[in-house]
Amino acid sequence: MHCIQKKMEARQQKGMYFHRVIDIIELITVRGDYMIRIALCDDELDELSILENVIKQYEEERNLSFRISSFRNGEELITGWENFDIVFLDIRMGGMDGMEAAKNIRKKDKQVEIIFITSHIGLTKEALSVHAFEYLEKPVRTETIYQQLDEVLEKISQNKQIYTKRKDMVEINTGKSTIRFAVDDIYYFERNDRKIRAVTKRGNYVVNETISSLEQKLKAYDFVMPHQSFVVNINHMQDYFKDEIVMTNNDIIPVAQKRSSEFKRVMRDFLQRQMDNNL
């Protein structure tokens, strides 16, 4: 009887795996990518090799396409950083350890899913601050890695609408022409000497629109107005202090005192949505 139950559970799980693979394929199509990017970081080369082989086995069995990059320490990972989707990260390493590397990663990438691998699991305040997806205890079994990949890829597929939204295009009037920008390419708009400047990943542009019209146009994409002269993309906010915002391009944006309460409310709503999406 126990064997029959186990077989039934295995069949159910295979069905779940199939539907998860369909979701992941849809996600890849939406994001315009052709593979999931995975980083592995461990200073124990044997452990690194075993982990890579298990993930490649998973990739083949699920008929997925991964791009796997391996690093031997935190410094290598930070130096060779790409826009990874998933990071398997050993905590205890020589030089820059995994926790310090994770903090550096979070400064530049809020979306990547971090899975810690460690010989000792102890959740400290420091560990919680980097919002890791999971903590796995060494030695990690193959079935555990499979389970984590299923879960993390399912979460990524559930977030595909967020990715799509950030890839949406908006039209901005520059006077001479209308330019289309991906929402995620825009850091902020600044009004200075009656001119509006768009600061983007593609460079800076003079815009022939009012700052208030830009706020209305982009409000649905998480743009806010912390100051009468600025409209900023919250998704590119790196740090927030009492009266200023640090953007991911390291520019500093002032927060007007009379707008401070409203800005905090908008930020709370934004963070709550992020938490809900991560559940």
Image: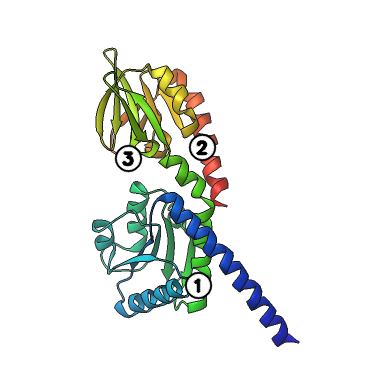
User: Which is in the foreground here, disc 2 or disc 1?
Assistant: 1
Position of residue 50 relative to residue 222, above or below, is below
Taking depth in this image into account, of 125 and 211 the one nearest to the observer is 211
Q: Are marks 2 and 1 in contact (CB under 8 Å)?
A: no
Give, as a three-letter code, the residue at label 3. Thr
SS for dot 1: helix
For the residues marked 3 and 1, what is the alpha-carbon distance in whole angstroms?
Answer: 33 Å
Taking depth in this image into account, of 276 and 240 the one nearest to the observer is 276
Classed neighbour count for the residue bearing mark 1: other residues with Cα under 10 Å, few (<14), some (14–19), many (≥20): some
SS for dot 2: helix
Q: Residue furthest top?
A: 194
Q: Earlier in the sequence, mark 3 or mark 1?
A: 1
Q: Which residue is mark 3?
A: 248
Q: Residue furthest right?
A: 1
Position of residue 190 relative to residue 43, above or below, is above
Q: Earlier in the sequence, mark 2 or mark 1?
A: 1
Give, as a three-letter code, the residue at label 1. Tyr
User: Which is in the foreground here, disc 3 or disc 1?
Assistant: 1
For the residues marked 3 and 2, what is the alpha-carbon distance in whole angstroms?
Answer: 17 Å
> Dividing the picture into quarters, in which one does residue 56 lie?
bottom left
In the rendered image, residue 137, in percent from the top left (x then y), is placed at 47, 73
> On residue 11, which mark appears?
none
For residue 170, say whether it is visible: yes
In the rendered image, residue 32, in percent from the top left (x then y), is placed at 39, 51
In the image: residue 41, left or right of residue 269: left
In the rendered image, residue 215, in percent from the top left (x then y), is placed at 44, 23
Q: Which residue is mark 1?
A: 146
In the image: residue 277, left or right of residue 89: right
Q: Residue at x 25, y 29 (%)?
A: 204
Q: Which residue is mark 2?
A: 270
Position of residue 213 relative to residue 247, above or below, is above
